[in-house]
Amino acid sequence: MTRQDLTAGHKPPCPPSGAGSANPGAAQGNAESKAQGHARGTARNIPRNVPQNAAQNTAKGIVLMLIAILIFTLMDATAKTLVRDYPPPQVVFARFLGQVLLAGLILNRRAPGLMRTARPGQHVLRSLFQVGAIGFFFLSLQHIGLAEATAISDLSPVLITLGAALFLGERLGPRRIFGILAALAGALIIIRPGAEAFSAWALLPLMGAMCYTGNALMTRSLGLREPVWTAMLWGGAVGTLVTGLAMPFLWVPVALADLWLFALIGLFGTMAQLFLIRSFSMAEASSVAPFTYVGIVFATLWGVVFYDEWPDLWTVAGALVIVAAGLYVWHRETRAKAG
């Protein structure tokens, strides 16, 4: 999945491909913005059926998150098919254009009002990071496997933790530093710099993860001050405009047989974000965030089924290290917030 998409439809950020690609590190930022609406009160004032309803909502939130990740990875698999015959910027253009059209269709007359913001500069910068994140991820799919690209892009949760400490002043203890270093080691296992099997193209999803980190931090800085639809509309509009500027120079006529694939790119991206938003509105971010790593499983499955891409032992080992490190960092952040 393109982790990079995961912050486009909710705030603060959560995970993504692209790019390609809701994730534990980014999802922690969502805990405040998405969970503050839950009713709180003393035990005396809580109805007896609330625990049961809360459990049901958590279960529904997890199911919605899994659906979102499934759709995101299907979008990435579709993109991998298209970038074999079309320039990646053209595929990214279709991704954002579809988001603008579908969001406008859903919001109808409310769309112009939701585009109004007192922070246009922040939205533009956040959207440019998102364009870079998805663009790097889609470009990598021309050269490396879907599972490999997804595993490397899953560095973004721990990179967000590092970026929040460097740029937002959030506390970073030695255990989280260990988790970040372990995740980076996992990425090096997959990329294997200096080895005979090394491919420089494997650096593209890493660059995408860095762009996604910038996108997530910008989204987190917006906090509760903007509606989620504002971020979606601005992201779609800026992405369409930026990639559209390149279309006169890169455009390849779309074959009639491929039109439905281009339509799917926009549809999948928008649908996945809507499921993601709904997931975080029903359940605590800390409850659903770990399930975003299921994207690696889905990506591996689509790679095998559609492209006969079987990940090698190094990719599997590196992916396991990244997931374990990401879950460890998420666990430490959850305990820190609870304390």
Image (cartoon, helix red, strand yellow):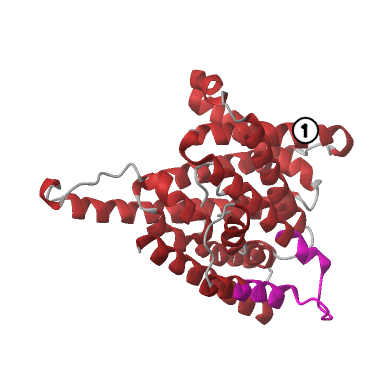
Circle 1: element type: helix
User: Which SS does the magenta portion mostly show?
Assistant: helix
Q: Nearer the viewer, residue 146 or 158?
A: 158
Q: Is 107 located above or below residue 197 in the figure?
A: above
Label 1, on which residue? Answer: 244
Instruction: Please report the residue visible at 35 percent of the width from the left and 62 percent of the height from the top.
Output: 338
In magenta segment, residue 185? yes
Which stretch is magenta? 181-205
Residue 198 falls in image quadrant: bottom right
The reply, left or right, for residue 48 in relation to residue 242 is left
Q: Is residue 108 above or below residue 304?
A: above
Q: Position of residue 96 (x, y in %)?
A: 66, 37
Left or right of residue 46: residue 315: right
Position of residue 78 in the picture relative to residue 136 (left or right): left
Give me the residue at 41% from left, 48% from top. 32
Residue 243, quarter of the rendered image: top right
**Quadrant (top left, top right, bottom left, bottom right) of the C terminus:** bottom left
